[in-house]
Amino acid sequence: MNKPAVGYELVVFATQWGLMLFGFGILTKFVAPLNLLSPTLYLGLYFDAAAKALIALVLSLTWLFIWDRQVRFYFRRRGK
Amino acid sequence: MASLGANTVAILIALGSFPVSLALTRFFMYWNAKRGIIGIDVHKLNRPKVPEMVGVAVPITLVFFAAIYAMVGGSSSIPLLAYALVVGLAAFVGAVDDRLKLRGIFKPLLTLLCGLPILILGLAFPGQVYTSTLHVPLFGGYHLPVIYPLTILVAVSVTSNTVNMLDPLNGSMAGGISIVAGGLLIGSLLVGAGSMPIFLYASLMFSLLGFLYYNRFPARAFAGNVGQLSIGASIGALAILGRTEIASIVAIFPNIQNSFFFLSRIRRFTEHRELTAKPTKLLPDGRLADSEDPRAPLTLVRTLLIGRPAAENEIVSTIWMIFLTSTSLAVITLLLTGVMA
């Protein structure tokens, strides 16, 4: 068993956990209160929700990208 | 403290899931073996034949005990009905896949439909099944009246498929998810959640432990898609019904990493059996090693084996330890989220 790899996995999880809480914090404090479109407009509520969902999606993809880089950085160098 | 009695009753009823799951697992081992429903344990040198689809014992136990809990009046029957339907539908999709060997893309698509009971019953009985407010650790919460209902379908599909993808070794899924359920049970107790999610987490954990008795190394029973998908759907449904959304994501970090790296390499939904480049290989001494095939996905098991082969039971213990770590982070997340309903 590759014990350093196990240790590194745990470090990756802790990092991703911290980043996740930070990302949800951004969404809660900054993105959710925004009024990107007035709810009085036709379908305004839905477009507002869609725009915020897009921001959340970008944050999620960034989070996954960081996860990907961390794992590849370690394991690709060790493995090949 | 007022809910201590209700929680104790909930856990005591859920405790019955263990012997029932154990007995059902035993029953399906013989039933399925007799009908030729068997798989081959490819990670053993002698490639033993093992009864497949025995994981059906878990969703049957979960649905049965949800019904019992609804009958004894432990909680509102609407969320329990939603939960039972989600688990039942996911088990059905898994059973169809086990028997008909569906193409990889169908599983995520069909499991999208498994979340519908929560969505429909939630719309029919507002406030009884789910609330559209997401509780965020440290930062409070925010209301998502449009997005939240839609994410229910995605959540159930993602959890069921990601659990399905991390069951390559004996006991890895059953042990890992029982740790997740146990951790979220403890977290829910600590934050004073209602007795319904406490019951369902306890029921899931005890059912899985019953199945694990026969699924642990060396396995005498395989879960099959019927077990894996329904157990994953159960985690997804519980995240919504128990309002443990973010903590549940944290708890299944090992599953998420495994699925993400699988999909990022293969770039399509496919079955493990269809892979031409395998992530691991069996050595002549019975240990598992990294296949060193650059085309193979970087699965969680493979990352643990790079450069150093290991015995199957040793890898499974390590996977459980990794789940224990992610679940500990999930419990901290629940505590940071604060007291729920």
Image (cartoon, grey):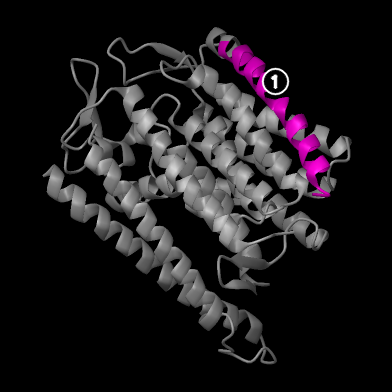
Question: Which chain letter goes with mark 1?
Answer: B
Magenta span = B1-29
For the question of whether residue A63 can be seen, the reply is yes
Q: How many circles with numbers are drawn on the protein?
A: 1
Decide: is B136 above or below B205: below
Image coordinates of residue B78 in percent, x first then y, are 82, 49
User: Which residue corresponds to the image point at 42% horizontal and 24% vertical from the top-left?
Assistant: B170
Say whether residue B4 is magenta: yes
* Amino acid type of the residue that numbered disc 1 sits on in the rendered structure: Val
Q: Residue placed farthest to the left in the image?
A: A80
User: Which residue corresponds to the image point at 38% horizontal and 29% vertical from the top-left?
Assistant: B317
Front in this rendered view, residue B107 or A55: A55
Q: Which picture quadrant has residue B43?
A: top left
Q: Is residue A10 left or right of residue B208?
A: left
Image coordinates of residue B187 in percent, x first then y, are 61, 48
Q: Main secondary structure of the magenta part?
A: helix
Q: Which picture quadrant has residue B307?
A: top left
Decide: is B131 above or below B59: below
Q: Which picture quadrant has residue B171?
A: top left
Decide: is B39 above or below B80: above
Image coordinates of residue B274 in percent, x first then y, are 33, 35
User: Which residue corresponds to the image point at 58% horizontal and 56% vertical from the top-left?
Assistant: B334
- What residue sits right under mark 1 in the picture? B20
Say whether residue A38 is magenta: no
Front in this rendered view, residue B206 or B112: B206
For the question of whether residue B53 can be seen, the reply is no
Q: Secondary structure at mark 1?
A: helix
Q: Callout 1: 10 Å neighbours few (<14), some, many (20+)?
A: many
Q: Is residue B171 left or right of residue A66?
A: right
